[in-house]
Image (spheres, rainbow, N blue to C red):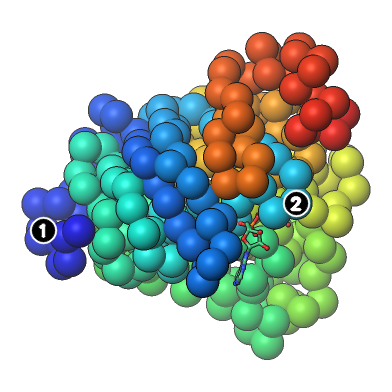
């Protein structure tokens, strides 16, 4: 496993070529094997859905890719650059932004202050991608602009989700890891957020790895997907094929 990344490796231009790839990824919590020999590719400029029931290992996959959890085995690459074992900070600088489950906004700060924190990270990163401005984020999510002076604790669940996604976008990531962005949100709000993500993928070439229990919604915007069960990949295909597979849907996807 490598440790520090040098200036050359944190350049993100290679990410446009090969996206995010993991091979043989294995992660454990003590005796519990949460990820077992997982291979996965998130092609550049596409949405890849990671689906599966509770406890399938989806969150663990994102935590391992973003450096919050050290894998016991396997390899993680972004744009051909080996990130295995790199720190969470180096992985963020390399172009991976992780939006964890639970709307991790800083509730005492205003909407705009939360966004400024994201912009700080963007300015610290050497990226080939031009970071968006806070005005760009407001254009994507107008309700954030209307509430820019309000403390984040006063936002609805959907607005908090928009805020954490907006904050992540300000770091000009190549790859966005999203953990259950639809959780607890009304279908109309989920549609709005997913439509913005799809637009960013199509217009900016953003790469998205989307973890969802809401498989139906996820597959409606995904290009391709993998299904995890008990830490192992049990299916992978383009999104339309997964959505049309009755057996798979009944066994693992809940719709
Ligand atoms: P959910 O949708 O419920 O979050 P998930 O697919 O994201 O499920 P993980 O949270 O990655 O699944 O959990 C995978 C396995 O690892 C489960 O068996 C879970 O109980 C276990 N696990 C997760 N976090 C920990 C932890 N901190 N300590 C011990 N075991 C854990």
Q: CA distance from mark 2 to mark 1?
A: 39 Å
Quarter of the figure with the C terminus: top right
Q: Is mark 2 within 8 Å of ligand 1?
A: yes
Where is residue 238 shown, x and y percent of the image? 58, 16
Residue 227 left/right relative to 83? right
Q: Crowding at label 2, few (<14), some or many (≥20) Cα neighbours within 10 Å? A: few
Where is residue 62 shown, x and y percent of the image? 51, 54
Q: Residue at x 55, y 34 (%)?
A: 233
Disc nearest the viewer among 2 and 1: 2
Q: Which residue is mark 1?
A: 7
Specify the farthest residue to the bottom. 108
Which residue is more in the foreground, 137 or 185?
Answer: 185
**101 lies above or below 137:** below
Image-quadrant location for residue 60: bottom right
**88 lies above or below 40:** below
Q: Residue at x 49, y 46 (%)?
A: 36
Q: Which residue is mark 2?
A: 54
Q: Residue at x 71, y 33 (%)?
A: 218
Q: Residue at x 60, y 51 (%)?
A: 57
Q: Crowding at label 1, few (<14), some or many (≥20) Cα neighbours within 10 Å? A: few
Q: Does residue 145 show up?
A: no
Image-quadrant location for residue 1: bottom left
């Amino acid at each position: 496993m490598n440790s520090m990344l040098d200036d050359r490796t944190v350049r993100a231009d290679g990410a446009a070529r090969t996206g995010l790839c993991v091979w043989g990824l294995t992660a454990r919590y003590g005796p519990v094997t949460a990820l077992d020999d997982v291979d996965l590719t998130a092609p550049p400029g596409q949405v890849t859905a990671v689906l599966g029931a509770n406890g399938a290992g989806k969150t663990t996959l994102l935590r391992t890719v973003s450096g919050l959890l050290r894998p016991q085995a396997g390899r993680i690459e972004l744009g051909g650059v080996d990130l295995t074992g790199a720190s969470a900070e180096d992985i963020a600088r390399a172009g991976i932004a992780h939006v964890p489950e639970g709307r991790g906004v800083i509730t005492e700060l205003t909407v705009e202050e939360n966004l400024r924190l994201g912009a700080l990270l963007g300015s610290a990163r050497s990226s080939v991608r031009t970071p968006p401005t806070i005005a760009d984020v407001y254009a994507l999510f107008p309700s954030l602009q209307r509430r820019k002076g309000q403390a984040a604790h006063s936002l609805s669940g959907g607005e908090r989700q928009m805020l954490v996604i907006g904050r992540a976008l300000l770091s000009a990531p190549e790859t966005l890891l999203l953990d259950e962005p639809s959780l607890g949100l009304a279908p109309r709000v989920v549609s709005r957020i997913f439509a913005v993500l799809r637009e960013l993928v199509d217009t900016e070439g953003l790469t998205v790895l989307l973890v969802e229990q809401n498989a139906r919604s996820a597959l409606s915007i995904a290009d391709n997907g993998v299904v995890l069960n008990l830490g192992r990949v049990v299916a992978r295909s383009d999104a339309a094929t997964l959505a049309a597979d009755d057996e798979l849907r009944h066994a693992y996807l809940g719709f």
